[in-house]
Amino acid sequence: MRLVASRSRNDQRPPVAHFPRLSSFQRSALFAREEARRYRHLFECAPDGYLATDRRGTIEEANRSAAALLHLHPGDLVDRPLSSFVCDEQRRMFATRLDRLTRQGSPRKEEWLLRLAPAGADAFDAALTVAAVSQSASGTPNLLWSVRDISSRRRVERRLLESERRYRSLYDDMSRSRDELRVLSARYLNAREEEAKRIGRELHDEAGQIGAAVYLALAEIGRDLLPHGRERLREIGALIQGIEDRLRRLSHELRPSILDDLGLLPAIEFLAAGFSRRTGVLVRVRGSTGGRLDSLLETALYRIVQEALSNISKHARATYAEVEVSRRPSRVVCAIRDDGIGLRGESAQKGRRQRRGLGLLGVRERLDALSGKLLLMSRPGGGTELLASVPLRRS
């Protein structure tokens, strides 16, 4: 005790522990053991199954995950051929691919999708990724395998494929129905135009005949009247003339004969001239169709222009409009532009959006029947442009 107390008084520092100094070789060995321990731990505790085999596929080492997938203890997997866990129908293919991989001797990775049959358990879909990781003394590669159960992934893939098949089937059915609907719509529009043509002609002819008969009757009555009565009769005749003019215009709107006789551009010019007289909106028509078009196409474009001009008179507050028709190699394009208030300004007023929408619905119906497209462009205060594009039929 006295010796300890004397030492503490002379030197308050604790005694120094002396360890032997490690040589560089010893430090390298210690570091290598630590690295090996770390990588061994990673190998054993990896979430995926790992196997090390020789070039023939004989298992030399397996981690816990691989053993769990194959329902064996890791030690029981050693010296067993990996091919023994491959389903019978795929075993020959597995051997062929393994032989090709080892003969090539390249370090590339490959993923093989196989069915594995563990000991005493149900087979499952597996993804095996194999790589040549080292060379033995004879120059042949050793192989490292990762094994992953992809049964759930394959089930999802099968459901996706089944969904895709159903989707394609529904899409094909929808396409066929759409084509049938397009044909029916074209026939309906054609029948409607034919009926309008018949009604228009009958209205024109009967109005002319009735008007002529009324004029003859009025002239005969006028001979027996006094001058004052004849003046009243002339007023009645003027009213009848106005009715006859309106009936002729209605007949023309039902089916303009100029469209059948002269074609699309003259019919649009005639329509624009009448529209300008009634509304005061200046309409300019330009372009060319390069000759006569198919009757259904001419009728559809004429009706589209007619509907567009009607919308301009009702909603646009425009002073100028332009109709341009151009024929391109594979389609005909018709553009109707105005300098009105634009769609947004018009649609802000109650009740008007619905009427314009119904008109555009009729335009789209005609274009759909001919596989055409509609583009509507507008900005507030900057006018509106309606662009209709219809493909030409191949003769």
Image (cartoon, grey):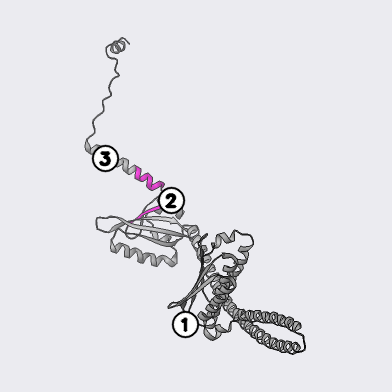
**Would residue 183 be visible to someone looking at this image?**
yes
User: In the picture, residue 135 is in which quadrant?
Assistant: bottom left
Look at discs 1 and 3 and give the one toward the viewer.
Answer: 1
Q: Residue at x 45, y 82 (%)?
A: 290
Tell me, yes or no, whether the highlighted magenta stretch contains residue 45.
yes
- Find residue 29 and name its label: 3
Residue 394 image position (x, y, % from top left): 47, 82
Q: Earlier in the sequence, mark 2 or mark 1?
A: 2
Distance from disc 2 to disc 1, alpha carbons, whole Å, reads 66 Å
User: In the picture, residue 299 is in which quadrant?
Assistant: bottom right
Label 2: which secondary element: helix
Label 3: which secondary element: helix
Q: Which residue is mark 2?
A: 65
Q: Which residues are magenta?
A: 38-54
Q: Is residue 18 toward the left or the right of residue 181 in the image? A: left
Q: Which residue is mark 1?
A: 394
Q: Are marks 1 and 3 in contact (CB under 8 Å)?
A: no
Tell me, yes or no, whether the highlighted magenta stretch contains residue 297.
no
Label 1: which secondary element: loop
What type is the residue that disc 3 sits on?
Ala
Q: Is residue 216 above or below residue 366?
A: below
Q: Is residue 129 toward the left or the right of residue 351 in the image? A: left
Distance from disc 1 to disc 3, alpha carbons, whole Å, reads 84 Å
Q: Nearer the viewer, residue 213 or 172?
A: 213
Distance from disc 3 to disc 2, alpha carbons, whole Å, reads 30 Å
Q: Quadrant of the N terminus?
A: top left
Residue 86 image position (x, y, % from top left): 43, 62
Residue 169 image position (x, y, % from top left): 54, 71
Mark 2: few/some/many CA within 10 Å (<14, 14-19, 20+): many
Q: How many labels were placed on the picture?
A: 3
Q: Is residue 54 toward the left or the right of residue 252 in the image? A: left
What type is the residue that disc 1 sits on?
Arg
